[in-house]
Image (tube, helix red, strand yellow):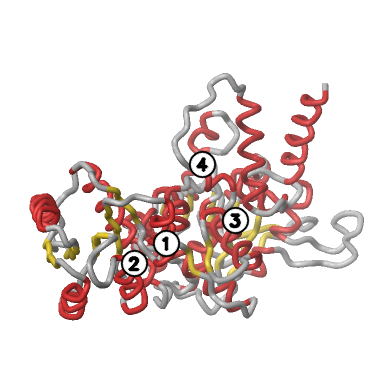
Amino acid sequence: MMNKSKQKEKILVIDDTPNTLEMLQRNLSSKGFQVFQSENVSDALGILETVNIDLVITDYKMPGANGIELVRHVRENYKDIEIMMITGYPSINGAVEAMKEGAENYLAKPFTKEELFEAVKTALESLKLKRKTGEVAGKLLPSVCGIIGESKAMQAVLNTIEKAAATDATVLITGDSGTGKELVSREIHYKSNRSTAPFVPVNCGGIPDGLLESEMFGHVKGAFTGATESRAGFFQTADGGSIFLDEISETSLAMQVKLLRVLQDKEICMVGSRRAQKVNVRIIAATNKDLETLVRKGKFREDLYYRLNVLSIGVPPLRERENDIILLINYFIDKFASDLRETKPYFTEKALLAMRNYDWPGNVRELENIIQRLVVMKEGNEITVPDLPSQMRFSTHREPNLKRNLAEVEIEHIRNVLASVNGNKSAASEILGIDRKTLRKKLSDFEDKVTD
């Protein structure tokens, strides 16, 4: 059943049969809609000029101007009215012509109340999505670093960022790969009193463990083979500002001891030096793993975890931010169309619905990559469902194949992610939360099993 909305949607019904008009009036009114009636296209045009109609339901064949002409008039003169065609003369040609002119739905008489209600519900949901798209098209970014989100989950994140920026406390940011943890860390830094000092991001998982200490704390001349001169590390570079330690869970236990000393004593020791030096650096760390679980397994130091987790911010996955998907789509369309000096494309309602219903395992990063590819590869200015990646086109519910083993499910997900980023292994590795070497090995191992 459809719920009554606080503000009644206005539906205009046009049919030259009084009994049909009365039936539609009775059924739609019972669901809380405000219904306007007309027995011909001419009177319907007058109603459209004076009333803000949400949905037009029109008969196909009528004396004088017919339903197709009305559909054409509405599409040429009104931006956000949905149209549904009903007819007692169902035909393929009629349906094609109605859809071509802009009717979103085509309902053949006789139809049941349930069929009518379902068609109306679908049309109004499309209208809501279309209006939402129009509303956000020119919106300004709501944050310093471009964090976009009107959902409750993201508003909670933005509120926590404000509180974190007002202090110098250490922050631990958690969330799946691709959710925007670095963007959150930048927002904290640039809203803090350290905003004029450096912000230094460090990917702890991307630096070999043997080099990480030197990269973090610097080294003196002669500290090791190849150290021909003294060099400052990330902490010295960030002095006075903030350092962002991404993938903190990838650091070794030995490195974790050294980071703990920085947090406790606010000082570092360069590789090859015995003299400690003070640093004034705010630490913001991030991880896509459960550190509490790693602590229990002995893979992450408990004392460091508690030192890092003074303030915590959990960045929600995109699948839990449904209301933000349209905002992000519009932002990335504007961005890439401007960068490429391309005409800004628009999505059909069905394409937008497919994207909104998709699970987004790669989160915002996956969405950004897909929009970039769509803008680059588009033909014409309309993006339809067939233009979307295959994993979105087949997002209807299917019975799961429970006879596949875990390795087969994993490789399917890996291939879907690779497809979503056009085969870019670096981007896929980031989305999957693994390094390129691991990704190559998984692909190679699977291919070996297939050829055995």
Q: Name the residue that disc number 4 marks.
A: 303
Q: Secondary structure at mark 2?
A: helix
Q: Position of residue 61 (x, y in %)?
A: 27, 61
Q: Earlier in the sequence, mark 1 or mark 3?
A: 1
Residue labelled with disc 2: 68
Residue 401 in view, yes or no? yes
> Reading the chain from its start, which is encountered first: label 2 or label 4?
2
Spot occupied by residue 34 in the image (x, y as percentages of width and height): 11, 62
Looking at the picture, tell me which residue is in the foreground, 223 or 176. Answer: 176
Disc nearest the viewer among 3 and 4: 3
Q: Which residue is mark 1?
A: 97
Residue at image mark 3: 245
Front position in the image: 420 or 50? 50
For the question of whether residue 310 can be seen, the reply is: no
Name the element at disc 4.
Answer: helix
Q: Are marks 1 and 3 in contact (CB under 8 Å)?
A: no
Q: Could you give the CA–CA distance between mark 2 and mark 4, rounded to whole angstroms?
A: 72 Å
Number of labelled discs?
Answer: 4
Which quadrant, please, contains the N terminus? Answer: top left
**Residue at screen point 79% across, 34% down:** 444
Q: CA distance from mark 1 to mark 4?
A: 69 Å
What's the CA distance linking mark 3 and mark 4? Answer: 17 Å
> Helix, strand or loop at disc 3?
strand
User: Closer to us: mark 2 or mark 4?
Assistant: 2
Residue type of the residue flagged with mark 1: Glu
Camera-nearest label, 3 or 2: 2
Proximity of marks 2 and 4: CB atoms separated by less than 8 Å? no
